[in-house]
């Protein structure tokens, strides 16, 4: 398993950043390679991705969710094997640090080479930058799920 850790500061309150992150169907707006996410249950999502012409589908289960603090997941079905957690840290009333930690298993020679070249880490960095632009540009979340898992 390979590991990635990245963080970014966003100029919104912690509840706004957290609430937006719980809107999984909105992820294609800021995550490269994510074509579609379907929220099947409060904790189960189905992902459709396409990266460098390779399409994949998989299900991910939220295994821990604490409002304004963290969302943790693991894949449960499909070709992709990964697990991770996103944590939200209040820096002040209007600034939040979003930290993503993820483990994933590259498949095949191309994915293993991409991993060695730091492609996944750069993708995560760019996704977090796009999340920052998305949420700061909106100024408010598109929704939120405050349930606890």
Image (cartoon, rainbow, N blue to C red):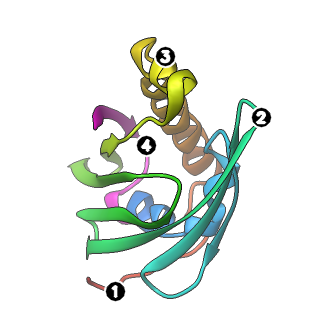
**Residue 53 disc label:** 2
Q: Which residue is mark 4?
A: 11
User: CB of mark 4 within 8 Å of CB of mark 1?
Assistant: no
- Camera-near label (4 vs 1) is 1
CA separation in Å, label 3 and label 4: 35 Å
Of callouts 1 and 3, which one flags the residue occurring earlier in the amino acid sequence? 3
User: CB of mark 1 within 8 Å of CB of mark 2?
Assistant: no
Q: Secondary structure at mark 2?
A: loop
Of callouts 3 and 2, which one flags the residue occurring earlier in the amino acid sequence? 2
Please indicate whether residue 136 sits to the left or right of residue 10 in the image.
right
Say whether residue 13 is magenta. Answer: yes
Of callouts 4 and 1, which one flags the residue occurring earlier in the amino acid sequence? 4
Q: Which residue is mark 1?
A: 147
Viewer-closest of 36 and 8: 36
Q: Secondary structure at mark 1?
A: loop
Q: Secondary structure at mark 3?
A: helix
Is 87 above or below relative to 114? below
Using a 10 Å C-alpha cutoff, classify the residue at mark 4 as few (fewer than 14 neighbours), some (14 to 19) or many (20 or more).
many
Residue lying at 58% horizontally and 84% vertically, measured from the top left: 40
Can you tell which quarter of the image residue 126 is in?
top right
Using a 10 Å C-alpha cutoff, classify the residue at mark 3 as few (fewer than 14 neighbours), some (14 to 19) or many (20 or more).
few
The quadrant of the picture occupied by the N terminus is top left
Of callouts 1 and 2, which one flags the residue occurring earlier in the amino acid sequence? 2
Is 124 above or below relative to 36? above
Of callouts 3 and 4, which one flags the residue occurring earlier in the amino acid sequence? 4
The magenta region covers 1-15
The quadrant of the picture occupied by the C terminus is bottom left
Q: Which residue is mark 3?
A: 113
Position of residue 125 measured from the top left corner of the image (x, y, whole percent): 46, 28
Using a 10 Å C-alpha cutoff, classify the residue at mark 1 as few (fewer than 14 neighbours), some (14 to 19) or many (20 or more).
few
């Amino acid at each position: 398993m390979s590991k990635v850790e990245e963080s970014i500061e966003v100029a919104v309150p912690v509840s706004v950043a957290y609430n937006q992150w719980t809107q999984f169907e909105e992820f294609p707006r800021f995550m490269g390679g994510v074509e579609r996410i379907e929220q099947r249950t409060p904790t189960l999502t189905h992902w459709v991705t396409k990266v460098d012409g390779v399409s994949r589908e998989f299900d991910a289960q939220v295994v821990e969710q604490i409002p304004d603090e963290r969302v943790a997941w693991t894949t449960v079905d499909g070709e992709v094997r990964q697990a991770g957690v996103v944590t939200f840290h209040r820096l002040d009333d209007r600034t939040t640090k979003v930290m993503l930690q993820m483990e994933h298993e590259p498949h095949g020679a191309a994915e293993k080479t991409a991993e060695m070249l730091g492609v996944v880490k750069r993708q995560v960095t760019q996704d977090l930058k796009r999340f920052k632009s998305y949420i700061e540009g909106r100024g408010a979340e598109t929704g939120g799920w405050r349930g606890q898992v």
